[in-house]
Image: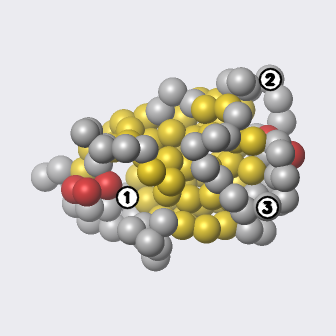
Amino acid sequence: QLPLVESGGGLVQPGGSLRLSCAASGFTLDRYRVGWFRQAPGKEREGVSCINSSGEGTNYADSVKGRFTVSRDNDKNTVYLQMNSLKPEDTAVYYCAADSFLHGRTFCDNAMDSWGKGTLVIVSS
């Protein structure tokens, strides 16, 4: 496993926005596809979004389409998840994961090699 660190979580009111970051330390992310996942209390971890190594391929869970945007800055070795119009049901610990295998593909799942420890997002009034 390679070190990934998520940041940017916090408490936000419904309808608000947050930007999460996933930073790599000691290795470059430009040959890795990266996924964002989340796990709400009492629920299984689910995929939120995925981005391929070039950034040209992205996909989203139906529940976040039109509200979340994944992007990457390979010069900064960081992947971002911009979350807008947040809802209480978005409350979860958000994780990023990376894998170098077939990094040009836009495919992310729970079998990815490296995982961060997560950042907590709470959407509440």
- 2 or 3: mark nearer the eye: 3
Q: Tell me how far mark 1 sits from mark 2, CA to CA.
A: 30 Å
| Residue 30 shows in this picture | no
Instruction: Give the structural element (helix, strand or loop) at label 2.
Output: loop
Q: Give coordinates of residue 7: x percent, y percent.
A: 50, 35
Report the front residue among 36 and 123: 36
Residue at the image position 33 percent from the left and 67 percent from the top: 85
Disc 3 designates what residue? 105
Report the front residue among 61 and 15: 61
Q: Is residue 53 left or right of residue 24?
A: right
- 3 or 1: mark nearer the eye: 3
Q: Give coordinates of residue 4: x percent, y percent.
A: 64, 30
Q: Is residue 77 above or below residue 64?
A: above
Residue that extends furthest to the bottom in the rendered view of this protein: 66
Identity, as a three-letter code, of the amino acid under mark 1: Ser
Disc 1 designates what residue? 17
First along the sequence among labels 3 and 1: 1
Please tell me in which quadrant of the rendered image residue 44 appears: top left
Disc 2 designates what residue? 26
Q: Tell me how far mark 2 sits from mark 3, CA to CA.
A: 23 Å
Residue that extends furthest to the left in the rendered view of this protein: 125
Report the front residue among 35 and 43: 43
Residue at the image position 58 percent from the left and 43 percent from the top: 110
| Residue 31 shows in this picture | yes
Instruction: Give the structural element (helix, strand or loop) at label 3.
Output: loop
Q: Are marks 1 and 2 in contact (CB under 8 Å)?
A: no
First along the sequence among labels 1 and 2: 1
- 1 or 2: mark nearer the eye: 2
Residue at the image position 26 percent from the left and 61 percent from the top: 87
Instruction: Give the structural element (helix, strand or loop) at label 1.
Output: loop
Residue at the image position 44 percent from the left and 72 percent from the top: 62
Q: Is residue 78 above or below residue 104?
A: above
